[in-house]
Amino acid sequence: MLNQNQTPLLDALKANATRPHAPFYTPGHKLGKGISQPLADLFGKAVFRADLTELADLDNLFSPQGVIQQAQQLAAEAFGASQTWFLVNGSTCGIEAAILATCGTGDKIILPRNVHSSAIAGLILSGAIPIFLNPEYDPVLDIAHSITPNAVQSALQQHPDAKAVLVVYPTYYGVCGDLSAIANITHQYNIPLLVDEAHGAHFTFHPKLPTPALVAGADLTVQSIHKVLGAMTQASMLHIQGNRIDCDRISKALQLVQSTSPSYLLLASLDAARQQMALHGKMLMSRTLQLANEARTKINQIPGLSVLQILSPPYQGGLGGSPGFVALDKTRLTVTVSGLGLTGFEADEILDEKLGVTAEFASLQHLTFIISLGNTPTDIEQLVQGFTTLAKEYHRSNLTVKNQVWLNLERTLDYALQLSPREAFFAVSEILPLTQTNKRICAEIVCPYPPGIPVLMPGEVITKSVLEYLQQIQAMGGFISGCNDISFKSLKVVK
């Protein structure tokens, strides 16, 4: 057992930031002495003294042998991994590296259609061929959950030459599928299970949270320590266990997608966040769960509102209890506002601009909130009061039939991959008006919010139904990201 009280990287950074010396190395502001005054006024100068480079005492992220190696070993033990890598380019680079380390050009990887755009980037970088599975879908709430074990089993039977399976666990809504069953099926083919656990870094530290991915049998998991724990934005970790993944390939892949000038502020925040959770994680998560349960109970009692929850089988729409929804992270709060006659976008705007409550994200029917160790009882009071006021003062007639019909449009979309994402991304392309793109091959990622899932990606055939769906999202108040034309009047296609 290692001494989890230690913070080797943080201690070394503090020692180097405070020792008297003349700095003739990067960064150019030289311990904050050259920083602009407005920036110093905002952050204070102390933080810039710690904005250091890879000095001898601070180790090297790509070849760690000192304090970074010690900090990563402590993190591996705390999170239950055999080896851990610190990430300064967010979970995005971890997902990219996971795919690069397990798949080469032409190799197949099985993954859900509602993956994060970082997985699409991994496909483009690696040249891997995606075998997409549709996640289980709740037509009542218009929410995509997890892929199911049966879907993975069927895909592997059809594609036994696949090199890996990738799963999102939990989803943005906090929904967890049956990861243990998926791991068992995947390992029958002796291939690794990769997990995008960006929103589940806290699972390790409390028994009332969903099972951590590594405990469920994942071979590799990527966690955004900044999303729900106490690290700085962009600070993440990649963990592995077992022998199905080559550690050297992970290290080399990370060298391709991480900065060669890593921020020691981010690295030290990972060391400190690990220590915090290793020593006090259960207490912090107990308090967080208590706050979340209070919010969930009180908001659920407000007329016109309902909260996403999980009940026992048989499955009931919107209530969980299915192969794609076996557990729920109760620190993630999704509130359905359509009963107030408001869209999620309208409710989000009112809460943010008039009631002082800011959600993580909005969709057509819902608002989703992250309740974490940094929230306070006062935050929860303000959240509940905001919804109370919203229900009393902004309630109107129900959403129109037109809106309700739109909710199920995604289920009818046809996806057909004509080229690999890499081939399409690097192909000669042209930009055409939407009216001229039907049946053409897409050359860019098109990701609508809602639901935040890439509807088109490089290599897929553009269809009339997809275009209509995207235009409808835009008309209902969503927006389109990822593509060259943010107004979504044109698309980049393979020439």
Image: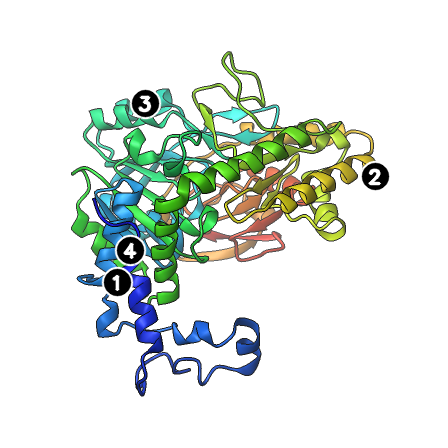
Pick whichever of labels 2 and 4 is earlier in the sequence: 4
In three-dimensional space, the C-alpha distance between marks 2 and 3, rounded to whole angstroms, equals: 47 Å
Residue 364 locus on image (x, y percent): 65, 37
In the displayed structure, does residue 167 sit left or right of residue 292? left
Which amino acid lies under the numbered mark 1 shown in the image of this protein?
Leu
Residue corresponding to mark 2? 393
Note whether residue 406 is visible.
yes
Question: Looking at the image, which residue is at 78% across and 40% down?
Answer: 389
Which amino acid lies under the numbered mark 4 shown in the image of this protein?
Gln
Which amino acid lies under the numbered mark 3 shown in the image of this protein?
Ala
Tell us which disc is closer to us: 1 or 3. 1
Q: Residues within 10 Å of mark 4 (few under 14, many from 20)?
A: some
Residue 159 locus on image (x, y percent): 26, 28
For residue 16, which quarter of the picture?
Answer: bottom left
Tell us which disc is closer to us: 1 or 4. 4
In the displayed structure, does residue 122 sit left or right of residue 395? left
Tell me: residue 30, above or below residue 141.
below
In three-dimensional space, the C-alpha distance between marks 1 and 3, rounded to whole angstroms, equals: 35 Å
Residue corresponding to mark 4? 6
Note whether residue 104 is visible.
no
Residue corresponding to mark 1? 61
Tell me: residue 360, above or below residue 218.
below
- The front one of 7 and 102 is 7
